Image (cartoon, rainbow, N blue to C red):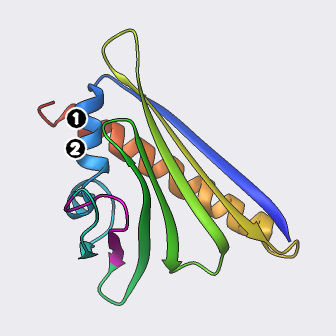
Amino acid sequence: MTRRTITATRHTTAPVEAVWALLSQARTWKDWTTFTVSELEREGDPAPDGVDAIRRFGFPMYASREQVVAFEPPTHLGYTMLKGLPLREYRSDVTLTPSDDGGTDITWVSSFDARSADGWFWAGFLKFLLTDFSRRLAKAATRTPG
């Protein structure tokens, strides 16, 4: 197994609080991603979206399940995948950093253990996905009162 790490970054003029409001609440993901399903299966601590929350994202016929493992408002959300992509030890960490212009720098880092035969494919797929997520999040946050 080889550990693969993928990073996507984006800047938005929206303040950290506006970005966090969208990122940290599972129910809002369907508003800014292409998902039609974004919900909590189990609340975490602090309620509802904190550590140990189980979230479902995707579509009616297919959805992934993720568990929140880090919840540090308003700058850090970490989660692991319980079901979804065929990846071992998948983890994502999203860090929001206030920038000098009053906006936010979004850094989305995901890592997983991959077989050498298909690791390149999943790394490319995740790079595309995380880049799209960070772009959509940055854009949606500019439309959200912060």
Residue type beneath disc 1 = Ala
Residue 60 versus residue 93 in the image, above or below: below
Q: Residue at x 57, y 42 (%)?
A: 8
Residue 54, image quadrant:
bottom left
Q: Position of residue 103 (x, y in %)?
A: 33, 20
Crowd class of label 2 (few under 14; some 14 to 19; many from 20; radius 10 Å): some
Per the model, the C-alpha gap separating discs 1 and 2 is 5 Å
Q: Where's the N terminus, which quadrant?
A: bottom right
Q: In front here: 143 or 65?
A: 65
Q: Is residue 7 above or below residue 113?
A: above
Tags 1 and 2 touching, CB below 8 Å: yes
Look at the image and tell me in which quarter the C terminus lies.
top left
Q: Position of residue 75 (x, y in %)?
A: 38, 35
Residue 144 location (% of width, % of height): 15, 37
Q: Which mark is residue 87?
A: none
Disc 2: which residue: 21
| Residue 35 versus residue 64 in the image, above or below | above
Residue at the extreme bottom of the image, as rendered: 61
Q: Which residue is mark 1?
A: 18
* Foreground residue among 64 and 53: 53
Which image quadrant is residue 35 in? bottom left
Q: At 20% across and 63% down in the image, what residue appears?
A: 27
Q: Which segment is the magenta one?
A: 47-58
92 left or right, relative to 24: right
In the rendered structure, which amino acid carries the disc numbered 2? Ala
Q: Residue furthest top?
A: 100
**Residue for point 26% across, 25% down:** 15
Residue 52 is inside the magenta segment: yes
